[in-house]
Image (cartoon, rainbow, N blue to C red):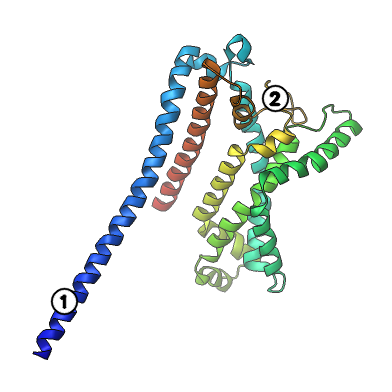
């Protein structure tokens, strides 16, 4: 009798456990569907409102036009596309080397006493609001760049591609450092030890063996940094100058895609509003192409 009761209790517990597992599977499935649905709704909204505007304006005229005058119904976003590319490229040139070298230092060189301070500083950088970065750029970087330009007779008022690139390079550092450091620490220790055993120096073992082994994580950090740079708005608005014209040099003002949307969406109506949504479509496609390119590179690296 007792054995039969124990078997029944055990069966009930197993049934309860199985029911809990099925319930949690359902919860996870609903959460995944919600995420996919959110992305799908954003895509539908953007393309449903943006593509008709592109057709009305003309795809090539919209993408390659060099004049943006909504009052005259002239909508050419090439200056904003080039502005976003220039500013993002500048941020990558400045931020990526510093971020990777800093992550290597923190993972392989940093003394234990200094590490908590340095780690806390990088995490604090990630938590600073964009508007604070913008104020820093407006109060410190813009006058500094203006004084340098006046000293060397380069022209410009300090609000420029160079200023925005420096500021965005600072903003993407925490993302690149955090992801790259984690990727380096995840490389098995015998990679480094094997390189030392074969006669490689400490630096050569890190840069020739450990860092290439962490390539996928490093690339992921760079892509996240690019996404942060190309999608940043508030800080760029405060330091870039926001002139809707083709870039005339790194010390001249420029307007990015995100800045164009934010500056004009508040009063836009009709075709003007739809053109701004179409601008968001172009930005969305840029991010999509970057992620797709990185995925293809990672797949090729895994096959090799």
- In the image, 34: left or right of 104? left
Q: CA gap, disc 2 to disc 1?
A: 73 Å
Nearer to the camera, 176 or 237? 237
Can residue 5 be seen here? The reply is: yes
Residue located at (73% from left, 23% from top)? 248
Whole-percent x and y of residue 227? 56, 42
- Identity of the residue furthest to the bottom in this view: 2
Graded by Cα atoms within 10 Å as few (under 14), some (14 to 19) or many (20 or more), the crowding at tag 1 reads: few
Circle number at residue 84: none
Residue 130, percent from left and from top: 67, 44
Say what secondary structure mark 1 lies in.
Answer: helix
What's the residue at 55%, 69% (across, down)? 192
Q: Quadrant of residue 197?
A: bottom right
Q: Nearer the viewer, residue 29 or 141?
A: 29
Dividing the picture into quadrants, the one containing residue 196 is bottom right
Residue 282 at x, y percent in the picture: 51, 28
Report x, y in % for residue 88. 63, 37
Quadrant of the drawing holding the N terminus: bottom left
Residue 201 visible in rendering: no
* Badge 2 or badge 1: first in the primary sequence: 1
| Mark sitting on residue 247 | 2
Q: Secondary structure at mark 2?
A: loop
* The label number, if any, that marks residue 11 in the structure image: 1
**Label 2 crowd bin: few (<14), some (14–19), many (20+), radius 10 Å:** some
Q: Residue at x 22, y 68 (%)?
A: 18
């Amino acid at each position: 009798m007792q054995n039969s009761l124990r078997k029944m209790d055990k069966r009930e517990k197993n049934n309860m456990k199985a029911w809990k597992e099925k319930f949690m599977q359902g919860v996870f499935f609903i959460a995944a569907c919600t995420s996919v649905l959110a992305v799908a709704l954003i895509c539908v909204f953007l393309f449903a409102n943006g593509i008709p505007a592109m057709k009305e304006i003309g795809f090539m005229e919209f993408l390659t036009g060099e004049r943006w005058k909504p009052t005259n119904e002239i909508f050419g976003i090439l200056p904003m596309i080039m502005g976003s590319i220039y500013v993002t490229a500048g941020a990558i040139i400045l931020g990526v080397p510093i971020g990777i070298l800093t992550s290597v230092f923190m993972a392989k060189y940093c003394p234990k006493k200094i590490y908590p301070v340095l780690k806390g500083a990088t995490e604090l950088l990630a938590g600073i609001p964009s508007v604070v970065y913008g104020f820093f750029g407006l109060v410190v970087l813009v006058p500094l760049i203006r004084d340098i330009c006046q000293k060397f007779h380069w022209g410009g008022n300090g609000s420029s591609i160079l200023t925005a690139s420096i500021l965005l390079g600072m903003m993407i550092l925490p993302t690149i450092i955090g992801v790259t450091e984690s990727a380096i620490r995840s490389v098995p220790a015998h990679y480094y030890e094997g390189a030392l055993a074969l006669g490689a120096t400490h630096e050569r073992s890190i840069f020739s063996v450990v860092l290439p082994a962490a390539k996928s994580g490093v690339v992921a950090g760079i892509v996240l940094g690019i996404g942060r740079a190309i999608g940043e708005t508030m800080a760029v608005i405060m330091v870039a100058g926001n002139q809707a014209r083709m870039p005339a040099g790194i010390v001249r003002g420029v307007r990015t895609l995100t800045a164009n949307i934010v500056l004009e969406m508040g009063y836009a109506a009709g075709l003007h509003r739809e053109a701004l949504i179409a601008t968001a479509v172009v930005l969305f496609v840029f991010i999509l192409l970057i992620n797709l390119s990185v995925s293809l590179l990672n797949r090729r690296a895994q096959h090799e």
